[in-house]
Amino acid sequence: ARPGEWLVPSGTCHVQPPLTRATEIIRAHIFRCLRQELPYTVQQRNLGWTVLKGGGLRIDQQVLLPPRRPGGAAKASTRAIVESRLPMIGKAAREDLTAAFGIKVSLFLTIGTIGHADELGM
């Protein structure tokens, strides 16, 4: 690093928006809990971000898996693996999100299927 003026004010912990930070924390736990079983085509979709009256935060996110292909047993087993580990992913991510944001976070993860619009990045 070269000496010079700082681009971010001192005391700033993160420059990423909170939703981006939350998505990255959840993604880290998806990779940690699924390891080699995780297909490279798994995506995430944020469904909801609700600040609660009591000062907490509710995050709803979907883990998107590739569509099942006819005769595709591997896809079905990927879904079963993700379904079985989703509670572990949610618990670990919820703890890290609560620590990162300094408020109680309620995290709701569901499983969905990647559609045509998701593949195009829409």
Image (tube, rainbow, N blue to C red):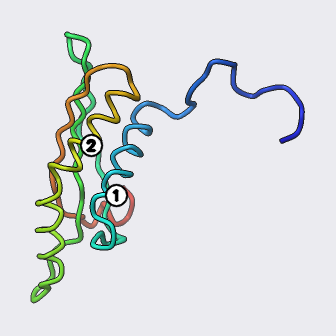
Residue type of the residue flagged with mark 1: Arg
What residue appears at the point 17 percent right and 82 percent down from the top-left corner?
Answer: 74
From the viewer's side, name the closer residue of 120 and 45.
45
Where residue 93 sits in the image (x, y, percent)? 29, 41
Considering the image in quadrants, where does the C terminus appear? Answer: bottom left
Determine which of the numbered discs, if any, sits on residue 88 in the image.
none
Where residue 56 sits in the image (x, y, percent)? 24, 18
Q: Give the residue number, with chain letter if any, for mark 1.
A: 32
Q: Give the residue number, with chain letter if any, for mark 2.
A: 92
Among numbered discs 2 and 1, the one appearing first in the sequence:
1
Q: Disc 1 on helix, strand or loop?
A: helix
What residue appears at the point 13 percent right and 76 percent down from the top-left corner?
Answer: 77
What residue appears at the point 26 percent right and 12 percent down from the top-left corner?
Answer: 55
Among all residues in the image, which is located at the extreme right? Answer: 3
What residue appears at the point 37 percent right and 38 percent down from the top-left corner?
Answer: 22
Where residue 88 sits in the image (x, y, percent)? 19, 50
For residue 87, above or below residue 41 = above
Q: Quadrant of residue 51?
A: top left
From the viewer's side, name the closer residue of 75 and 37.
37
From the viewer's side, name the closer residue of 2 and 16.
2
Among all residues in the image, which is located at the extreme bottom? Answer: 71
Give me the C-alpha separation between circle 2 and circle 1. Answer: 10 Å
Q: Is residue 109 left or right of residue 36?
A: left
Q: Quadrant of residue 1?
A: top right
For residue 87, above or below residue 42 = above
From the viewer's side, name the closer residue of 27 and 47.
27
Q: Disc 2 on helix, strand or loop?
A: helix
